Every structure is written in C-alpha cells, then in structure tokens.
Image (tube, rainbow, N blue to C red):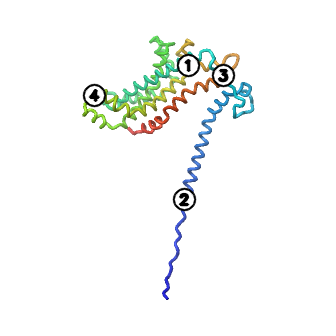
C-alpha cells in the first residue's frame, strides 16, 4: 500500500481584521459628520421652533424643544409690522437686479479674460484678487463719498451698484475657472461652421458654463439679500430700507419683541432656502466643475 505524505496545511490569513479597520473608520467619520450637521442645524431649528412658541415660553428659563402649544401670533405681528411689504419689495428688487447685472458683467469679463490676450490682463486678475481680499466695511466711507458725489445716496440704484461692485471680483474669478474647463476646440468647430463670436458665446459657452453661473448667483443673492451695513448707511429714507434694516425695528428703547423678531427672521430666511432648494443640484455640479487648475 502506497503512502502519501501530506504536507503542512496552510491556513490563509483572515481578512476580518484588516477589513474591519476601514469599516470602523468609515463609521467614525459618518458619526462625526452627523454630529457636525446636528450642531450646525440646531440654531436654525431653535429659531423656527421659537417662532411658533407663545411669548411666555420664549422667555422661559426651561427649554422646550417642541412648540406645544404653538401659535401663529408671532408671524402675524411680523407681517403686520410697519414697513414689511415696502422693505420686502425693496429687497426683492435690489437682489434680483444685483444677481442679473453681476452675472452678466462677470460672464463677459470672464470670457474676455479666458479667451483673449491683451495688455494688462495679468494685472487685472491680480487687481481682482486684491479687491476681493479687502474687508467690505473698509470700503464703506469711499463708497459713501462716491455715491454722494454722483447724487446716488438714498437711491436703490446706488445700492444695487454697491452690491454689484462687492460681488463682481468673486463672480469674475469663479466664472473664469469654469471657462478654462471648456475646450477651445468647441469654439473653433463652431467658427468653421460659420458662427460668429456672439453666436458662440450664446450657443456654446453660455449653456456649458450655466452650472458656474448658478453657483455664483447664490453668492450674489446671499450678499445682496443679507446685507445690513450698506443698506442702513446709504439709505436715509425709511421707504428705501431693505429687510435686514427692517428687522432692527423690533428692538426699541422700550424693549425687544423677541417673538416678532424671531418670526420675522424665519420669514427673512425663507427666500434663501427656497432659492437654494431650487438650484441645489446644479450648484453641486457647478462647484465641482469649477475646481480646475489654471
């Protein structure tokens, strides 16, 4: 009878240990992300929760995390507050004008900077970065004097021009990054087909850079909608105030209407949330597509 010699049995190393490490790390990162989101969203939740509370519960030292019983009296006080509709219309007009004007100017400026070579191009790009780094409150007095000499104080046109000047450096630089990601060969092919420069801009560049336009429009919208300092200093007539200035009217020498103020703040934040929800998909695509290297 023949005998076979069996060699030593080799046991393959288990992969459970190395496989658990990435999984545990992933869970830890997910838990940290969830904790960060909760901490970030809690002030917003507390604002909305407080807006539905009765006035006595708002001033209570015992926290209540659910608005029960809830009331709409705070929102009624905010809506019927003097100047609400007028300031809402002013904010809507100014914000829409700033978004449209700044995006149009920034788009054509970005096309010129990314597609043409001219004297002073590098210097202009450096100037755009320098202006972007200057703190906005430091520009308050120069802008005030400039608008005063141009007879644009206490005028919504002057406020629109001020906001456009504030957001243009960022929008130009961002849209320039998007345009750098579009191959020049597409424009050359359109030229071979007989398309002119304006046709190429309208039919080729504009649709491709639309995610970038949407991404930068969010910045312009938030800047114009949330600003208080310039609107308060440049506007002297109360009929020209915007909603951020209107919010201050809830604090007077006799006290602060916290219920109306928090409800008004909730209403004030709604347009930004709605605007973001409408364009969030294109915003994410735009922010990732614009991260190109010059």
- Neighbourhood count class around disc 4 (C-alpha, 10 Å): few under 14, some 14–19, many 20 upward: few
Nearer-N-terminus badge (3/2) = 2
Earlier residue among tags 1 and 3 = 1
In the rendering, at what x and y percent does residue 290 appear?
A: 42, 37
Identified at 52% across, 76% down, the residue is: 8
**Circle 3 residues within 10 Å: few <14, some 14–19, many ≥20:** many
Mark 3 to mark 2: distance in Å? 57 Å
Residue at the image point whose x is 59% and y is 15% from the top: 83
- SS type, badge 1: helix
Crowd class of label 1 (few under 14; some 14 to 19; many from 20; radius 10 Å): some
Q: Is residue 265 above or below residue 83?
A: below
Of discs 2 and 4, which sits in the foreground? 4
Label 3–label 2 contact, CB within 8 A: no
Residue 147 point in image, percent of width and height: 47, 14
Q: CA distance from mark 1 to mark 3?
A: 16 Å
Label 2 to label 4: alpha-carbon separation: 60 Å
In the foreground, 68 or 221: 68
Q: Which mark is residue 18?
A: 2
Identify the mark at residue 196; answer none if there is no mark: 4
Circle 3 residue:
260
Residue at mark 1: 88
Query: Between disc 2 and disc 1, whose residue precedes?
Result: 2
What secondary structure is found at the residue carrying circle 4?
A: loop
């Amino acid at each position: 009878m023949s005998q076979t010699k069996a060699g030593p049995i080799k046991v393959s190393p288990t992969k459970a240990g190395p496989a658990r490490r990435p999984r545990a790390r992933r869970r830890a990162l997910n838990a940290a992300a969830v904790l960060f989101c909760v901490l970030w969203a809690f002030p917003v939740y507390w604002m909305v929760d407080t807006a539905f509370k009765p006035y006595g519960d708002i001033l209570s030292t015992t926290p209540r995390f659910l608005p029960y019983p809830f009331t709409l009296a705070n929102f009624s006080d905010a809506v019927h507050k003097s100047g609400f509709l007028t300031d809402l219309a002013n904010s809507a007009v100014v914000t829409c004008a700033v978004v449209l004007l700044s995006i149009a100017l920034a788009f054509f400026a970005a096309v010129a900077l990314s597609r043409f070579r001219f004297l002073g191009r590098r210097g202009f790009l450096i100037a755009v970065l320098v202006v972007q780094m200057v703190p906005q409150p430091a520009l308050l007095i120069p802008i005030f004097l400039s608008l005063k000499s141009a007879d644009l104080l206490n005028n919504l046109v002057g406020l629109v021009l001020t906001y456009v000047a504030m957001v243009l450096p960022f929008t130009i630089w961002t849209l320039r990054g998007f345009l750098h990601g579009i191959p020049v060969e597409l424009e050359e092919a359109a030229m071979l087909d007989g398309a002119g420069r304006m046709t190429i801009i309208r039919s080729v560049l504009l649709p491709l850079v639309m995610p970038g336009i949407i991404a930068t429009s969010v910045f312009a919208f938030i800047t114009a909608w949330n600003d208080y300092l310039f609107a308060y200093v440049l506007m002297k007539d109360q009929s020209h105030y915007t909603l951020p200035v209107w919010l201050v009217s809830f604090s007077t020498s006799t006290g602060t209407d916290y219920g109306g103020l928090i409800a008004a703040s909730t209403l004030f934040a709604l347009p930004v949330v709605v605007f973001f929800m409408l364009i969030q998909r294109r915003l994410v695509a735009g922010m990732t597509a614009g991260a190109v290297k010059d």
